[in-house]
Image (cartoon, rainbow, N blue to C red):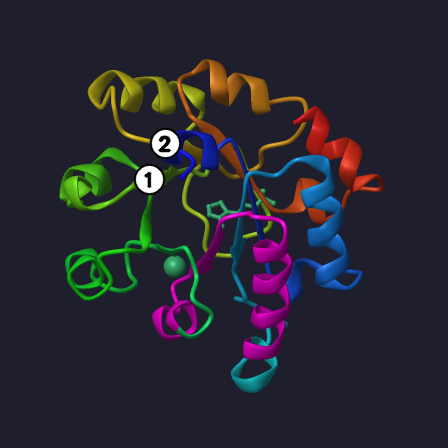
Amino acid sequence: MTSIHKILRKYFIMGSQNCSMPPGEILKEAIAGGITAFQFREKGLGSLSGEAKLELGKELRNICKENQIPFFVNDDIELAESLQADGIHVGQDDLDVEEIRLRYPDFILGLSVSNSAEVNASPLHLVDYIGAGPIFATTTKDDAKQAVGTDWIASLRKDFPELPIVGIGGINTENANKVIKAGADGVAVISVITSAKDIKKTVKSL
Ligand code: TZP
Ligand code: MG
């Protein structure tokens, strides 16, 4: 099994609401470009629910399986279970981390944190990685909190030398390097890939 640090390197997140072409096509291109993980995040304005969400999830899950790309589901634990996901990613207001850990010991478990108060209140010993951000301003998530900058990554790295950290929010081919230099194991991105003219090239240059 690949280490979690490597999995986080180029972590692509997408739901149909982020796409102006078929999500499966985008995912295949992103895989060809070299993403190291994928998260199905069907959420927000224009997102699918019920059977349609499940069907898209199955399609994307299969693409990941065929290409040996770790597949994560955002929030929806039942969906993660029925798609036999490799992992689940939750936010501060979602499912309880302790309960997930207890019920699904084998899932790779990720938790979003947006500031130090959240970090201090989170059971970090139970999670496999944190998603820290938004690092830069983003318009992709409607309820995104205040951008924290790469200095926060550096201070997290100092406080938690061993903790797997992926930076998220407003990351593109120009600034990804700053996030890694500050100490993150990887970058998690949505729009830089979903809106790219040349997806493969964009992923390569991240
Ligand atoms: N969580 C914090 S920022 C964000 C999420 C899901 C959106 C990231 O999208 P983009 O387009 O890469 O800024
Ligand atoms: Mg959430």
Residue at x 58%, y 24% (from the top left corner): 176
Name above or below for residue 107 compared with residue 173: below
Span colored in magenta: 54-81
Q: Residue at x 60, y 22 (%)?
A: 175
Asked if the magenta segment contains residue 75, the reply would be yes
Of 13 and 6, nearer the camera is: 6
Residue type at tag 1: Ile
Measuring from the top left, give residue 155's x and y in whole percent.
29, 19
SS at mark 2?
A: strand
Q: Quadrant of residue 103?
A: bottom left
> Is there a contact, CB below 8 Å, between mark 1 and mark 2?
yes
Packing grade of label 1 (10 A; few <14, some 14-19, many >=20) is many
Q: Is residue 196 visible?
A: yes
Residue 150's x, y, as percent?
A: 44, 22
Q: Secondary structure at mark 1?
A: strand
The main secondary structure of the magenta stretch is helix
Q: Quadrant of ligand 2?
A: bottom left
Task: State the residue position of label 2.
Answer: 165
Q: What amino acid type is highlighted by mark number 2? A: Ile
Measured along the vertical axis of the image, is residue 195 above or below residue 42? Answer: above
127 is higher (above) or lower (below) than 147: below
In front of the other: 9 or 105: 105
Please, which residue is most extreme toward the bottom here?
Answer: 51
Q: Which residue is mark 1?
A: 130
Can residue 135 be seen at all in this image of the molecule? no
